[in-house]
Amino acid sequence: MYTIRTHRLYTSPSPLGASYNITSFPVLAYTMTLVQAIDERVSFLKAQINPQNKPLANRAFEIQIETIRKADTEKVALMVLQKTKQIENARDMETIEKLYTDLDALEWLQRQVVKHIA
């Protein structure tokens, strides 16, 4: 006579199986805060400053650092609009270059604010 087993003991998934990997370990994701993103960007820009660069390039990095540090993250969208308007009204090349450099830094900051608030 044959016996049929109707019950099954539950065992944890094999460590070699895909379900073990999916269900057994929490996903550890590094989430960078806005302050950390800003600090990392400033560090990156500082590293770009080099005596072998043209002075204009180094000045652009310095302007971006200053702009990012001084910017009010709650008003960055307004600041982007203001810089855009200032560029439209600017006449001399040195001012236009500085404004575009400021605008570039502010747009980066705006993307970070949106990314970290959402």
Image (cartoon, rainbow, N blue to C red):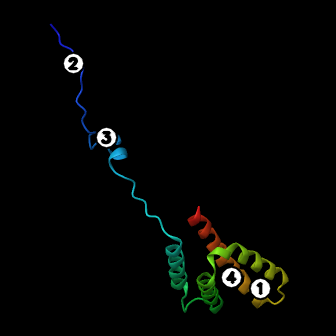
Q: What numbered label is drawn on residue 5? A: 2
Which quadrant would the C terminus be assigned to in this image? Answer: bottom right
Q: Distance between the residues labelled 2 and 1?
A: 82 Å
Which quadrant would the N terminus be assigned to in this image? Answer: top left
Q: Residues within 10 Å of mark 1 (few under 14, many from 20)?
A: some
Q: Disc 3 designates what residue?
A: 17
2 and 45: which is toward the camera? 2
Q: Disc 4 designates what residue?
A: 102
Q: Disc 1 designates what residue?
A: 96
Horizontal side, residue 53 vs residue 91: left or right: left
Q: Residues within 10 Å of mark 3 (few under 14, many from 20)?
A: few
Secondary structure state at the residue bearing disc 1: helix
Q: Position of residue 96 (x, y in %)?
A: 77, 85
Q: How far apart are marks 4 and 2 (CA)?
A: 75 Å
Tell which circle, 4 or 1, labels the residue nearer the N-terminal end. 1
Horizontal side, residue 115 vs residue 104: left or right: left
Above or below — where is 32 with respect to 69?
A: above
Q: How crowded is mark 4: few (under 14 residues within 10 Å), some or many (20 or more)?
A: many
> Which residue corresponds to the image point at 85% horizontal and 83% vertical from the top-left?
89
Mark nearest the camera among 4 and 2 is 2
Tell which circle, 2 or 3, labels the residue nearer the N-terminal end. 2
Q: How far apart are marks 1 and 3 (CA)?
A: 60 Å
The furthest residue to the top: 1
Q: What's the residue type where badge 4 is placed? A: Asp
Mark nearest the camera among 2 and 1 is 2
Q: How far apart are marks 2 and 3 (CA)?
A: 25 Å
Secondary structure state at the residue bearing disc 3: loop
**How many discs appear?**
4
> Which residue corresponds to the image point at 70% horizontal and 72% vertical from the top-left?
77
CB atoms at circles 1 and 3 under 8 Å apart? no
